[in-house]
Image (cartoon, rainbow, N blue to C red):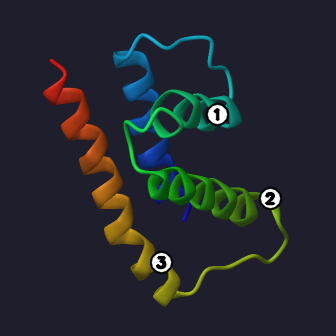
């Protein structure tokens, strides 16, 4: 879960930088700015804001909760969504340039 989160985190961070949105200093800040500038404005569907929040929470649970594990099925279910999310961001960045 951790690696899938970080793949999305760096994609969102790059999106914010490409869009000249600065002042982000934390994981929570990246999540908030993404929501503020891309989800609430309708640039990205709300489902992707929810997805990124779920991934954020899963990563936090995996990293900081004692004995938190995600089974193979949960990981396999999340992987295609991660790929689609990164693809969406990739398309946005390259379509804008």
Q: Secondary structure at mark 2?
A: helix
As displayed, is residue 11 above or below residue 94?
A: below
Whole-Å distance between the Cαs marked 2 and 1? 21 Å
- Nearest the eye: 38 or 10: 38
Q: Quadrant of residue 38?
A: top left
In the rendered image, residue 47, in percent from the top left (x then y), is placed at: 47, 59
Mark 2 or mark 1, which is nearer to you?
A: 1
Mark 3 or mark 1, which is nearer to you?
A: 1
Whole-Å distance between the Cαs marked 3 and 1? 25 Å
Q: Residue at x 44, y 23 (%)?
A: 16
Q: Considering only order in the chain, which callout, 1 or 3, is on the residue closer to the N terminus?
A: 1
Q: Quadrant of residue 63?
A: bottom right
As displayed, is residue 8 above or below residue 61?
A: above
Please give the residue where the numbered disc 3 appears in the rendered image: 75
Q: Considering only order in the chain, which callout, 1 or 2, is on the residue closer to the N terminus?
A: 1
Please give the residue where the numbered disc 2 appears in the rendered image: 64
Please give the residue where the numbered disc 1 appears in the rendered image: 32
Residue furthest to the right: 66
Q: Residue at x 38, y 38 (%)?
A: 11
- Nearest the eye: 39 or 70: 39
Q: Residues within 10 Å of mark 1 (few under 14, many from 20)?
A: some
In the rendered image, residue 27, in percent from the top left (x then y), is placed at: 65, 36
Q: Quadrant of the C terminus?
A: top left
Q: Secondary structure at mark 3?
A: helix
């Amino acid at each position: 879960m951790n690696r899938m989160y970080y793949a999305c985190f760096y994609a969102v961070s790059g999106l914010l930088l490409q869009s000249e949105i600065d002042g982000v200093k934390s994981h929570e800040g990246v999540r908030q700015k993404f929501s503020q500038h891309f989800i609430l404005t309708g640039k990205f569907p709300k489902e992707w804001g929810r997805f990124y929040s779920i991934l954020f929470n899963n990563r936090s649970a995996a990293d900081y909760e004692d004995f938190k594990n995600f089974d193979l099925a949960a990981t396999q279910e999340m992987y295609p969504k991660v790929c689609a999310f990164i693809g969406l961001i990739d398309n946005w960045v390259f379509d804008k340039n």
